[in-house]
Amino acid sequence: MVRSAANARGGPRERDETDAARDEQSSGSEPSGGESSDDPGPPALSIEGLTKRFGEGDDAVLAVDDVSLTIERGSVVGLLGPNGAGKTTLIKCALGIVVPDAGSVRVFGNDVREGRRAAYADVDAMLEGARNDYWRLTVRENLRYFATISGVDPDSVAARHDRLLDRLDLADKADTPVRDLSRGMKQKVSLASVLAGGAELVFLDEPTLGLDVESARTLRAELRRLAAEEGLTIVVSSHDMTTIEAVCDRVVMLSNGRIVADDGVEALLGAAASDAVRVASPDLTEEAVAGLRERFEVVGVDREATPPAVTVAAGGDRLYDLTDALRAAGVTVSDIRTVQPDLEEVFLERTGSVPGAVGSGLGGASR
Amino acid sequence: MSAETPRPGPRDGADEAARTDDTAATRPGIDDQPRPATYYHLARAVLYREYLIFVRYPANAIGGIVVSLFFFGALFLGGQLLAGQALTDSIEGIVVGYFLWTLSVGAYSSVSNDIGSEVQWGTLERHITTPFGFAPVALLKGVAKVVRTFLTSAVILAVMLVVTGTRLSLAPVTVVAVAGLSIVSVLGLGFAAGGVTVLYKRIGNWLNLLQFGFVGLISAPVFDLPWTRVLPLAHGSAMLQRAMVDGVRLWEFPIADLALLVAVAVGYLLGGYLVFQLATGRARRLGVLGDY
C-alpha cells in the first residue's frame, strides 16, 4: 500500500534529522541487516486495542471495541460502516478530539499520549458537518492562517499555496471571502486549508457530502491527483461507495465498533466476485427457482424485474451445470451475465446493512 | 517545543525541479522550504485575523456602539427627569461606571460567543489537532477582543462626555492600565462561560445574562464591604473612579491597591482558563467537543 512518493518525501518533522543521518549512513556502507535507506519508517497511523464507550450502565454504547489498525505512509484508506459503526469515534480518537478508554494511538511513530504536539504536527482533518474554516476570511487568508496554526510560517509556503489554489481551480477566487463561494468551492477551500500546512496524514470525513454530481466528481479527481502527486496518507470516511472506490486503495469496514473487513479494494471486490451469475427469464417460476435452490446456492431472486431474474452462485465449471439445470426445467434464458460486485454488495455481505441506507458518514455514536 | 523543530522538505519533487533557482533567489522568504512557525507567527496570524474581521465587518462594532449609546441616553435622560440635580451631581461616576460596563460586556461576550462560534464552525476541533493547540489561540483572541473593546468603548465614552458635558481625567496610561486589568478578570469569566458552552451548548445564551450582573460588581460597596474587592471588576471599578473622577495617576495609587488589581485580574483569568481547559477535556472524554 505504500506509494513510492511517500518514501521519496521527508517524513514528519521529528524524523527528518534521524532519517537523514540513517540514509547517509546506509548509502556509505553495506546494510548490516538493520534498516536500509528504503525503510519507510513508522506507519502514518498505528492504532492498538482502541476502545471507547459512551455513557454508563444499560445506556452505555460501545462505540469502538478493541480496534487495531495500521495505515502505512502514502496509502489512501477508506472507512466504511453503517451509522453507529464507530467510524467517527475511531477517527476522532485518532485525532485526539475524543479521549479513548483504552488503547494507544501512534502518529508517525509518536504516541499521542506522550506528546500531542509532536504527534499531530503533520496531521489535519476535514470533518463532516463543519465549516472547517473561516468564511469571513478570503481563501488565501484561510490558507495562511491554517498553515500557521499547523506550525508552518505561511510566507515560506506561499508558492505552495499558489500551486494548491491552481490545482483546485481556486486561483481566481483566492482573494474572495469564502462565504461568497458556492458549496462545492467551499468544500475545496476546506480541502486546501487542510493541505495548506503541509499535513502528511489527512482525515477527510464525507468530503463529497452535499455536493452535486459534477462537483463531487471534480473533488474525487482532485483527491486522486493529490494523493498520487503529493504522496499523502489519506483516510477517507464516506457512505458514497463511488468516492471510496474511486479514491481509495484499501477499505476498512466497521460494524458495531469492530473491523469486519480490511483489504484492498480490488481484493475485496475479487473475493466477493465469487461465482455469482444472474439469469433473467420469463420462465423463472417459483417452481423453477425451487428446483435451482436444490442444486445451487441462490443468492437472490428479483421478481419485480422484467423478465424475472435469479442470481445463482454458479461460476466456473458450475456454469455448465446451471445451464443444464435451466434447460431441464424448461427455462428459456433471456439474459445471462456474471455479477460484477461493487463495494456496496461487499459491505452488505460483511455487515448485513447498506451504509448509504443508514446514513453512515461519520454519524457515529459520538455525534 | 515542536513548533521550533524543522519541517520536512518540499514534497513536490517534480514542481521543485521545474522551478528555477533564480526564482528562489529573487524571492527570498518565498522559497517553498517550509520554515517552522513560532509563537510570533501564531500571534501575528490570530491578531491579523481579528483585525481583518473588525475592519471588514464593522457593522457588529457600530451596532454595539449604537445600542450602548441608546441605553445610556435612556438612562441619562430618564434619570434627569426622575432625579434631577441628584443625577447631575453623580453623573461623573455614572459615566465612568457605564464606560467600564461597556468594556466588560464587550470583553466577556466576545470571548464566550467566539468560543461558541468556533465550536459551531468546527474550527475549535481543528485547533485541537495542531501543534499549538487552542490554548494560546484563545488567549491571543482574548487580547484582540480587549483591544477591540477599548476602541469601541472609547467612542462611547467620548459621546457620553459630549452629551453630558462632563469633564473627566483621561490620562491614557492610567485609564488603560486600570480599566484593562479590571476587564481581564471578566475575560477569565468569558473563558469559563465559553468552556461551559462547549460542554452544554444551549446554556450559552443564558450565560450572556451574566453581563447584567456586572452592574452589581461595578457598583459594589468596596469601602463598606472590603471583601468585595476580590470579586471581578469591583476593586478595579473603585480605582477607575478615583483615576477618572479624582485624577489619581497610576503611580499615585498605593502599591497594595495595584497589587490587588493585578492579583484579581490574573486570578480570574487563570481560573477561567482552567475551567475552559477542564471543560474541553471533559468534552473530549464525552465525545461532544464538536457537537452543536
Image (cartoon, rainbow, N blue to C red):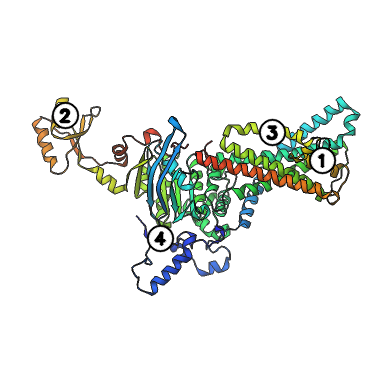
The answer to whether mark 4 and mark 2 are in CB contact below 8 A is no
Would you name the residue on which mark 1 appears? Answer: B238
The answer to whether mark 3 and mark 1 are in CB contact below 8 A is no
Q: x, y (%) of residue A30?
A: 35, 73
Q: Say which residue appears at 34% left-offset and 50% top-offset.
A: A249
Instruction: Tell which tag, 3 or 1, sits nearer the viewer.
Output: 1
> How many angstroms separate mark 3 from mark 1 (CA)?
20 Å
Q: x, y (%) of residue A217?
A: 40, 45
In the rendered image, which quarter contains the N terminus of chain A?
A: bottom left
The answer to whether mark 4 and mark 3 are in CB contact below 8 A is no
- Tell me if residue B162 can be seen: yes
Instruction: Tell which tag, 4 or 2, sits nearer the viewer.
Output: 4
Would you name the residue on which mark 2 appears? Answer: A289
Element carrying mark 2 = helix
> How many angstroms separate mark 1 from mark 2 (CA)?
92 Å
Q: Residue furthest bottom?
A: A28
Q: Confirm whether circles 1 and 2 share one chain.
A: no
Would you name the residue on which mark 3 appears? Answer: B210
> How many angstroms separate mark 4 from mark 3 (CA)?
53 Å
Instruction: Tell which tag, 1 or 2, sits nearer the viewer.
Output: 1
Q: Is residue A152 left or right of residue B272?
A: left
Q: Residues within 10 Å of mark 3 (few under 14, many from 20)?
A: some
Element carrying mark 1 = helix
Q: Amino acid at mark 1?
A: Ala
Q: Chain of mark 3?
A: B
**Could you tell which of marks 4 and 2 lies nearer the N-terminus?**
4
The answer to whether mark 2 and mark 3 are in CB contact below 8 A is no
> Which residue is at the front of the view, A182 or A49?
A49
Q: Is residue B212 left or right of residue B221?
A: left
